Image (cartoon, helix red, strand yellow):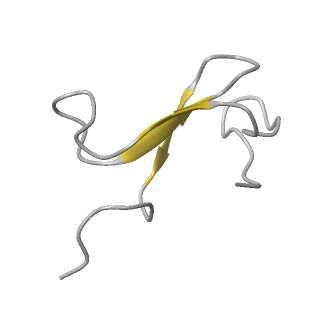
Amino acid sequence: MEKECINCQQSLSGGELTDRWEDGNNEYAYVICPHCRFKNILYDYGGDDD
């Protein structure tokens, strides 16, 4: 994953990934930035593609 944080523009490499519905009610996957702790939503990641 070579994406940047939309908050601090640092690499999201090493961030905490939470998949869709993993925390109970998150419709989209997200990565918590390891630098600023911002939650970056990954709209096109995972899930069921029917």
Assign the N terminus to one quadrant of the image.
Answer: bottom right
Q: Reply above or below: 42 against 32.
A: below
Assign the C terminus to one quadrant of the image.
Answer: bottom left
Q: Horizontal placement of 24 versus 47: left or right?
A: left
Where residue 39 appears, as percent x and y from the top left, is 51, 29
Residue drawn at the location 39% of the way across and 46% of the way down:
29
Q: Horizontal placement of 14 versus 40: left or right?
A: right
Where residue 36 appears, as percent x and y from the top left, is 70, 17
Q: Horizontal placement of 20 versus 16: left or right?
A: left
Q: Horizontal placement of 25 versus 40: left or right?
A: left
Which residue, as the protein is rendered here, is positioned at the far top? 36
Which residue, as the protein is rendered here, is positioned at the far bottom? 50
Residue nearest the observer in this picture, 44 or 22: 22
Q: Reply above or below: 26 against 35.
A: below
Q: Give the quadrant of residue 34.
A: top right
Residue drawn at the location 76% of the way across and 29% of the way down:
8
Where residue 9 appears, as percent x and y from the top left, is 80, 38
Q: Give the quadrant of residue 21.
A: top left
